[in-house]
Every structure is written in structure tokens, then in C-alpha cells.
Amino acid sequence: MTSVQHSRYALFHHPSQTINHGIEWRLTPRSKKYVAIVPPSVLPGPVTVLRAQKGKLDLQITPEQADALKLWFCNLGPDAMRPTACDTLKLCHNGPYSVIGTNMVATDSMPAVGSQVLVRVTARVNSIGPLYKSFVIVHDVLEADIVHPGEHARAKRARPNA
């Protein structure tokens, strides 16, 4: 592995990169906007790809991941709406994102529908007049070689000579 590949691996797998505390949001005095320095962070555990196109990505998250997102946004004021992904367990992203292959090299291919991926996200709050809406933004996706124990046994039964 090159040093770039080692760095990408660390960005997705080091414990310090996982969402584990609330963001320190600040309401600016003049413009009355919520701002924070939010580095991309990894959602804990894999997510399931529901749709993947260039510029559009829909992901199914688990209740535990929704709880991590709620923790991330817990320091927002009561006047700010939380991301819908926390309630619907569906993270919909419109905009650019990077795809990292299993070899830790950026790729142009899209993750397959139904596949399990790791995802790094960041947060933003937009204001429309007096209303505040928080968003989860997908930064990049890591195609992961994740095999569930039951799937491995089924695959072995399907190929008895393997």
C-alpha cells in the first residue's frame, strides 16, 4: 500500500474519525447563521446503497447510525430542524461525492445497489429567513468487502467445491 492508500484507510477506520460527540455550533451575532467547523466523519458501521448515480446517492442507515447523527446535531438550538435521515433512516444526497474502491484508490464506478459501504459525512445548516434546516452531506464512500456470516455459509452451499 502507498502512503496515500494508508491515509485513506485511516480516514475510514481509525476510531477518532467516527462520529462520537456533538458538534459545537455557533450562532453568528450579525447574520444569525449557525456555523461550525465540521470535518468529514465516518458513520459508525456500514450502510446499504439504495441508489447510486453520478451526483445522487441514497443510503439506508441503521437506528444506531441515526442516533449518532442526532448526537452530532444535539447542540443546535431548538429553532433548527434536524436532518430527516434521523427519522426516516434514509440518507439522500444530491451533489458531488467521491467513491473509493476496496484497494483504497479513487474510482469512477458507482457502488452497486444493495451493497454495503462505509461513508464519511459532514454537516451544514442552511437558513431561509428565520428558519434553520440542518443537512448531512456525503463526502466520500468506501466500497467495503463486507460479508455477513449467513451469506458466507449460503455462498459455500451454492458452490460446494469452493
Image (spheres, rainbow, N blue to C red):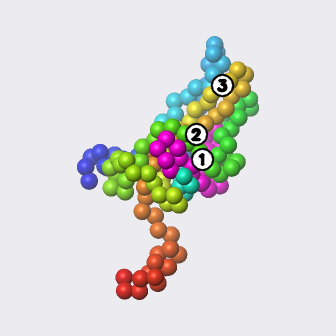
Q: Is-magenta flag for residue 55?
A: yes
Q: Please say if the residues under marks 1 and 2 sit with CB atoms less than 8 Å apart.
A: yes
Q: Secondary structure at mark 1?
A: strand
| x then y, percent, for residue 16 | 46, 46
Q: Secondary structure at mark 2?
A: strand
Q: Residue farthest to the top?
A: 30
Q: Which mark is residue 127?
A: 3
According to the picture, the residue beneath numbered tag 2 turns out to be 136
Callout 1, which amino acid? Answer: Leu
| x then y, percent, for residue 130 | 72, 22
Q: Which mark is residue 91?
A: 1
Q: Is-magenta flag for residue 161?
A: no
Q: Residue at x 37, y 47 (%)?
A: 108
Callout 2, which amino acid? Answer: Val
Asked whether 131 or 34 is in front, the reply is 131
Mark 3 or 1 closer to N-term? Answer: 1
Q: Quadrant of residue 30?
A: top right
Q: Secondary structure at mark 3?
A: strand
Above-or-below relation of 48 to 26: below
Q: Quadrant of the C terminus?
A: bottom left
Q: Residue farthest to the bottom?
A: 160
Q: Residue at x 70, y 20 (%)?
A: 129
Mark 2 or 3 closer to N-term? Answer: 3
| x then y, percent, for residue 75 | 65, 34
Q: Quadrant of residue 28?
A: top right
Span colored in magenta: 52-73
Task: Say if residue 15 shows up in the picture.
Answer: no
Asked whether 72 or 138 is in front, the reply is 138
